[in-house]
Image (cartoon, grey):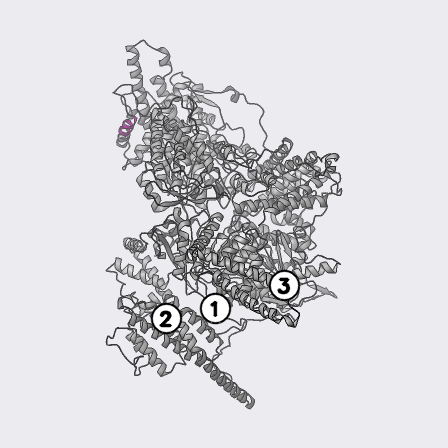
Amino acid sequence: MASGDAEALEGSSGFSSDSESEGESSLLEEEDDDNDEPEEVYSDLSEDELDEAEGAELPESGQGPGDEAKLPPDLQKHLKFLKGMSSILVNKLAKAECASLLHDSVESEFFVIDGDSLMVQHALNNNFYEGQNLHFFYSVEAFLFDITQKGAKYVIVFFKDAESMWLGNSYLLSLRSALILHLKKNTEIPVYTEFTNCFSLKWQAFVQENYPYFILISDEAFKLAGNKGMSSYLLKIFIFHTLGNKINVAMTSGMHSDIRRVYGYYINSKMVFTRCKKIHKDLESVHQAIVSFLSRNRTNGLTLGDDQNGLSVAKEVQQDIAQLQCLCPDGLDIRSSVCVVSCSVALKCHMHMLKCKENHNEAETANAKTMDEILTFQEATDLCRIYCAHVAILIHLPLVKRAQKKIDFKWVKPVSDFLQLQYVSQHFVLKTLEVTENWKGDMVHLCDLNDTILLARVALCSGMVDNTESCFQFGEIIEEEYKKLWQTLSSLTPDCDLGKAFPLQATSKMMVQEHENVLAEGALEIIPEVGLIPVNITMVEEYAGNIFKEYPTLSSDSSVVTALSENKEFDNLVDWCPDKGLSDDYERTRSSGFVEKTNDPWVRKRMLRNYQKLVRFHRFYGSTLEGNITKNIITNVQGAITVAPKAASVISGKSKKIPPKKKADLIAEENTRKKKEKEDVKQRDQWSLISKSIMKMIQENFDQGIKKLDEFLKKCSGDSVKLIAEMDVLENSFKIWVEHCQMTDSTKKNNVIAGRVMKRIHTILDKYEKQVDKSQLKQIASYLKELGFNKLAQTLPEIEQKAARSKISKKEDKFTVGVDPVRFQLQFMGPYLLRDERNDPDPRITHFIPDTWQRELLDAVDNNESAVIVAPTSSGKTYASYYCMEKVLRDSDDGVLVYVAPTKALVNQVVATVYNRFSKTLPDGMVVCGVLTRDYRQDALNCQILITVPQCLEMLMLTAQRQSWVKKLRYVIFDEVHCIGQEIGAEVWEHLLVMIRCPFLALSATIGKPESLAHWLQTVKNYWQQIEKTTENPVKVGGKKKQQIRQPRDQKSFKVRLVMYGERYNDLEKYTCSSDGSGIEFVAYHPCAALTVSHIEKYGFPSDLSLSPPESLRLFDTMAEVWTSWPRAQELNPEEYKEFKDKIVIKKSDVRKYEAELKDELLNWITSGHSDQVAAVLYKLKPRNVVNSPATMVKQFPMLVEALQKERQLPALFFSFSVSLVERLAKETFQHVTNKEQIKRGSDDAKKRLEVENKLRKLSKRAGKKQPSDPKESHVSDNMVMKETEQEMLHQKLQELRRIPPDCTYAVESAADRKILDTIFQRLQQAKTANQLRFYLERGIGFHHPSLNSKGRQAVEMLFRLGFARVVTATGTLALGINMPCKTVVFLDDSVSLDALQYRQMSGRAGRRGFDVIGNVIFYCVPLPKVQRLLKASVPQLRGQFPLSISLVLRLMMLAAKSDDKMDAEAKALSLLQHSMLCYDKQKRQITLKLYFMFCLQFLLKERFLDLNGVPHGFAGLVTHLHQHEPANFIFVSFLVKGLFHKICIPTDQAARKAGAARFPDEVMESLLLILANIFGRIYLPACSTERSSATLHQSKVFLDDLPEEFAEAVNEYNRSIQEIFGCFFLSASKHADMLEECQLPLSKTSFGGAWSPQESNSEFITQLTGLQNYPTTAVSPFVTLSGITNLDLFKTTNVDSISLRTIEVLSSNIPLLSLTKYDQHGRKMPLNAYVIDFYRHGSLKPLLTDNMLHLGDAYNVLNEFQLTLSSISTSFKELCDNKEDLVVLAFEQLKDTFFQKFEKIKS
């Protein structure tokens, strides 16, 4: 960084630049001041920001940060630094991405919550009234309980220095102390208070050890805490320091949640990561200056007294607590203790202050005014009585009785000052109790120390009654409590005469003032009454008929009901037909063009050619997946199906007598035997011919030689020939070992070579045990002896054994491996150990022998059963899908199978596979395979196998006119079914699973507790079975019932099988990558190193945490080393273990048993009290000295790839979640190999190549001339032949010069011929990335991410699968089902998206079955704590989403009303409504869901989208077409109905149109875009983004303007309607709430629902304090009623989460409101992103990345979504309006066309 730039921050450096063309983090090189070696850094600071920071002005007097009038000199000098840092940080925070902070598998994630930011977040709650402690604690606990229930793992940190932020408000200071103590004492949350600040060494060590996922911090301080500006700087320093230390940050501002997740604005540390060390020192000094300043501005009470004899509050508190312990040795309730001690200390300090003032005034002239502003001691005593009375009431008054009315009151100045003093005393009381070890008091109710409104009420009431004891009728219990408090207080203040407990107020001092405008109330607002509109709908009656019985309904003559019977007129839409049927989404989806009807033969020919071309490509693409395996399918004649082979029955007792064979049979057997012998002879001869070449290949490249051997063995039919070949290879392998031993020192032997010898022995003894003769056994025994395995040799038949060589070395151990046989097999033969595989063929499978679990899948398909299949990646679970496809194809010509894939990329892969696997002759118009996605379709409804995405299948299932096609469904396959738990679209998967009648297969590799999923799906199938029984109406013939006859293929099964298989074929070994600058080192990471003792105690071993054989061996050795007296050490010693002992062939299953024994033994150690030994074992297994840095990742990446190539670990996939980084790393690798080639070739190489090219060019010109025709010109002909020869030689020379050296490419030329490469590269010509990507791919390097066009992605996939490309950098797009197996998977960096699910999906790609014996997973620049959490986390358990919305209810009603088969349609709708996964086994939630459904229906009725019979009306069709955009769809229709669009669609004048102008000007287009963007394109930016400097913006407006006034009023009208509907819903649902639970704090479970005696309820004084509400509070949380919240607020607020009853479990996210303005917790407006209008103006993606702060992939997706919406609207308008010249129709058509043209230009 230039030195001038550093002046922006007071001469410090450390803010570096990372501006990048795509707006993402870049990696630049920068010089470090401490050493001259260049290093790379992540940073995001542009030159403009540096200039802005440098030009930051000092704040004017009285207007500085925090509005301080004067700042001390030590802080003044830091202001420029603070301004620069704040400006820079705001620019970074403005780019924060709104993301899900919690994933389903958050056990893998650990994060930190800044405790003071937590306080800021909840103290800013709009519903919170300051002083209402219990409401505040409820808000905090509700938040923490919510994230805890969602699986969050976190700690809370309160820094000591952060206390200074609250010194300006003593109430908040005491509240902070109470919160800390409450969380520590009453919850299980880890709370840390020992860190001084973020610069402390303890904090740094804590962060390094735990590496939090992120730290949750507020970017602004609490406005009422005092010195807001300086306090905010403290938080900004914390954020900046955190990001600079490579820890991510999530902001509390803008956080929101739904039923499954919590969302927030997330800043990746890579965006502002800095390597400069000086900045931390500067930050620390500034931090200390701010803390010092804030501490000097503390309130009047931390240290009191004007002279040297002043009292210390802290000391007084300590003394009083000690005295209280003596007075009450058994302890007091914490509320009583804090009350009496704080009052005692406050009174003592106040009395001392009065004496000081009195002495001061006696020495000088008396100042009556000063004394009048201070309470007298008697008045202070009265205030303490009132306070004690209020605490006594708190202790005994039930929460439901404490609801308060909102009042606007103000304590008089002297009273306020005394209360501040008391709050300071409370603060010190709590601080003292925190460190008091022998305190016996109850601390349960720390959360309820103060209730300011109740205190004010007591003060007001006490001042209105006579000052006699009889007037204060508290009730016996409360009065006794109050007297006890007063007596204790009097005992603590023996030097003060406090007087009696009554009267409460002995003086006439007015304590509190209540504003008159509050007392004189106007007319009250009315809460709507709940009244349901009765309907006549069968489906509604069946689903929620009981709801009508429980709740009042409107009468038929009600004005609301009668209004519904009137036809709704659309005065503004004369030419529009709202009830007109619309085309469905299928018809609107762009067709392939191959099925268009045309009479033009040339067009038909071209369409056919294009179709054939597409089919050829699909088959070519599919061949890269599985090879050419196309099978022609013939339909079964009578629908017969292949059944699973049945085992021969064995009957006990007599067996049937086998009849003698016939002569013909004997002759046939003899002929077969001779034919087999002849074939064996032929194969022996063949082996003799090729054996030498294979042996030579084995010596040169063992793996390639064995591959050739396996190819030969597959072709062999006889075991005798196979055994001969195996024995020859065994002999050759042993010779290689002998030669290795002779050439190598005994200490440097490579036992892997000996392992290959043992591998051959294993194969022979396992597969050919019956065929091996004595001589062969003798030879094997000799090899075992030579290896040093005498005991194993003795287990073979005892025959005379000779050495394998004629000459034996004098040293007997020359060729021994030096390791015991079992240990040798575990250590060096782990990947080669034999698996327990079946050897009995299955007639249904021809090309491999399926495992038992695979046969179970085939049985399920044969029996028409459903199945949930959970098996690791590459285990073979997908094969059942293709078997199922074949079954459907064979059964009939009209049955349909649907394959549901989560992404279009996976759709394309499956389509190619189907084309490559199957062909079938079908009737005209029918095809085998079809495709349907949101933007493309091909043969979707005229195919037998449809490949689609969930949203499209749901559209077909819920469209009435497609039900005839739906009935053709025979099977549905859900691939990657765990997507039912994803963030977006999860509810669609759920809808499909419950609506389909036919059987299904649900496939996944990552589902936690799949049993619950299978049980839920079985209940769904039970429902359909019941429906099937009730709808089977026998046909009556002549008055008699005729039994229906069914074909076997129609037999239905409703069973759901759960098939689980957890064993990977290949083990995965994990490594961390260490790079210290000198090279790359791979450090083994033992899986058990990820565990802790506490984790094993709580969760056990993760189900998928398996060990390879060497890892099991290492675990035993470590256990034996740690516990030298381990009783079972000998028993579990590998050589003595029962499953291993004296075994020549140890199998993988034996090792798994051994692994399980070791794990169980570790658990036994823990349960038997040996946890320390377990901790020591786990510690020893951890890797040591792993050094790497994200700062040098790009620079080191090419070396990493070279290291993998050297270790023969390619091909490899390198995963990162940054699109720009993925491309950058591929580019760096390409540049590295090209630079390497240039150096290797030298400077003359280019000249030689150019000379040859020039010669060839000249020869080509001459060769192009006309050939001689005269025979006399033969010499000319001879000359041309010579030229051709020369040209051919030059071509060869040029090819030689162009040939890339082997060490300068990662491509494997032999993997694919040039023709295949040209075919692949030819498809890239039309893509913008073709040239760049082609250059990379020719070197075997590729990149893969969602922003890359489909042709580019497919090229990378095909070349990688073919083995040509071996280095591919990729984002998570490859993790979801794409078939790209590799040898090694590398995780390049940490990310918010890298969770346990993604880790398992990505790592599952490693270890290709049939290619690799083991898979490798490498963590590069991923912190070790993150690695630890990824490995030990369990896979996520699927949980349901909230299943309903108003739009979905309307779609279900339309399906039921318009379908021809109404019983079937209603059955589908009821299945969806009744079988929500969220409500499975939860009856209470089902009731809530029924209520929600009913009130959705009420809205549709009132808005006239449905009539009383459930028939859709009006613009219901348009609303359902836009269903995915709720509530924008309803608001958009209201705009249309009100005629608002017609008011703005004003065309250009005729003169302009004649001049070539468009029909509508740009102003109209942009006005429409503004409206549409405000409802359909809503992306919120962080509130702090408005503080971003406009100088950093280039082409974009960024912030979206508000809606025009009329449109905004229409939105408000809609919102009021929704609030009324769902306010009534909450009132109705409150009847089903659990009020006992509602009166408990969510996390600590502290209950405030105590009993209330009749005596207390009759107290007049208590009655005056309660029952003051104007509105009921039955439907809101009793905790929020303390701040005056009532049922009315449910009808007024846009966010009900903080006030509604928790046990109803309906959130704001389920209420379809559209807020015109959204504010964060600090009251700052969160602007909407203007990306739609900005793109329309400049038509470029780049400004959207740099200015609008979108990511590349997100920018493309949101623009695509918007243009699809625009297209849907335009098409609907043209169909609904009969007037084709309607201005709105034309305007939207012009807008659609213009936007589409701009969008097409950016598609790559």
Residue 1695 pos. (x, y %): 53, 36
Query: Mostly what secondary structure, the magenta segment?
Result: helix
Q: Quadrant of residue 597?
A: bottom right
Residue 505 pos. (x, y %): 39, 19
Q: Residue 1322 shows which numbered tag?
A: none
- Quadrant (top left/top right/bottom left/bottom right) for the N terminus: top left
Q: In the visual, does 1221 lie left or right of 544?
A: left
Which is nearer the N-term, disc 2 or disc 1?
2
Q: Amino acid at mark 3?
A: Lys
Residue bounds of the magenta highlight: 310-320
Which is nearer the N-term, disc 3 or disc 1?
1
Q: Amino acid at mark 2?
A: Arg
Q: In the visual, does 1727 lie left or right of 799?
A: right
Mark 3 vs mark 1: give the one in front: 3
In the rendered image, the vertical position of residue 632 relative to residue 1800, given as above or below: below
Mark 2 vs mark 3: give the one in front: 3
Q: Mark 1 highlights which residue?
A: 851
Residue 1664 pos. (x, y %): 47, 25
Q: Secondary structure at mark 2?
A: helix
Q: Residue 1265 shows which numbered tag?
A: 3
Q: Residue 756 shows which numbered tag?
A: 2
Label 2 to label 3, Cα distance in Å? Answer: 63 Å
Label 2 to label 1, Cα distance in Å? Answer: 26 Å
Label 3 to label 1, Cα distance in Å? Answer: 67 Å
